[in-house]
Image (tube, grey):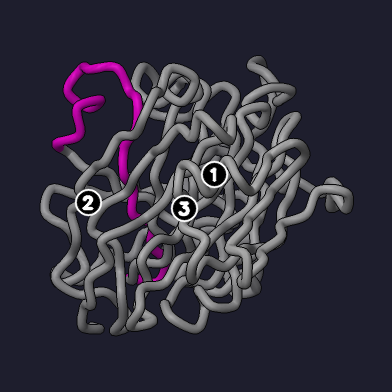
Amino acid sequence: MNERPEPDRRPRVGRRTALQSLGAGVVALGLGVAGTASAQERFPPSDRTHWGRPKRLGDGTMATFFAEGRSGAPRYLGVWFTADALDGLPQGGESPSRITELPLPAAAEDASNFEWASVDWNPSGHLPREVYDVPHFDFHFYTMERAAVHREIPPGECDADGDGAPEAAVPCEVQARGTEPLPDAQLPEGYVSTDDTVPLMGNHWVDSEAPELSGEPFTHTWIYGSFDGEITFLEPMITTEFLRGLRGRVVADVKTPERFPQRGFYPTQYVIRHLRRQDAYAVFLRRFKQFEGS
């Protein structure tokens, strides 16, 4: 979730590359991250893992990865990033959210309905206050094509009352399309709409039973996104404080709908993992299950 986002238009970082050696099973990302460290931790697995083009995040590097099972079905889909990516980020005040768009490996697009991803840095958090107003990252995994998101959900203003206080940061017709209800079959149990179409994203649905909505501190949570009355993205949302304090991994079950817009494989868990030997983190989806389309 974000308020008024600002896409990251920095140039690609050419000197940092993602390399996959299929014969040796060696994966190296960024500077000083040895393939042997990845092999020792065995994550991401060297066999059947594909990498997207890396980009900068803070003082570090990040890239998407996709691991497939022996059948070709999705095993893992996620974002790997170096620990120094948590440093050198814009801080607090009125700094806008920053979106960094990430391509998925071609294999992920072939084996699933996911099209692209983004990592969004929110230095001051966002609404609702006293819940999500702490520094955190949004990890979006989109099933809606990137070009369609940019074309159909542009920034703008909706001041339907004409009182000078806009209800949304998109044109009114886009706000209406974004807040169209999900059909019952696509509505996970307990999820409720925020009724706010965010530019370059869509509407967000939150779990009404999430701990942070009952007064507990926000650490990480799972969000669904929609547009035109169908699910268009899946989103783990994680605070920087939680990431910095993490040792090992956290596995969280995902509440899933009965159906998705298109038939295919979708995750039933997400994982946040600290990779000590690599001095890195991975946020990824797993335990994919095949769902029917609506």
Q: Secondary structure at mark 3?
A: loop
As drawn, the label of residue 197 is 3
As drawn, the label of residue 55 is none
Q: Residues within 10 Å of mark 2 (few under 14, many from 20)?
A: some
Q: Secondary structure at mark 1?
A: loop
Q: Pointers 1 and 2 in contact (CB under 8 A)?
A: no
Q: Secondary structure at mark 2?
A: loop
- In the image, the segment drawn in magenta is 209-229
Q: Residues within 10 Å of mark 3 (few under 14, many from 20)?
A: many
**Residue receiving disc 1:** 162
**Residue receiving disc 2:** 254
Sequence-first tag of 1 and 2: 1
To which quarter of the image does residue 250 belong? top left
Expressed as whole percent of the image width and height from the top left, the position of residue 155 reads 65, 53
Q: Quadrant of the C terminus?
A: bottom left
Look at the image and tell me whether residue 159 can be seen: no
- Between label 3 and label 2, give the one nearer the viewer: 2
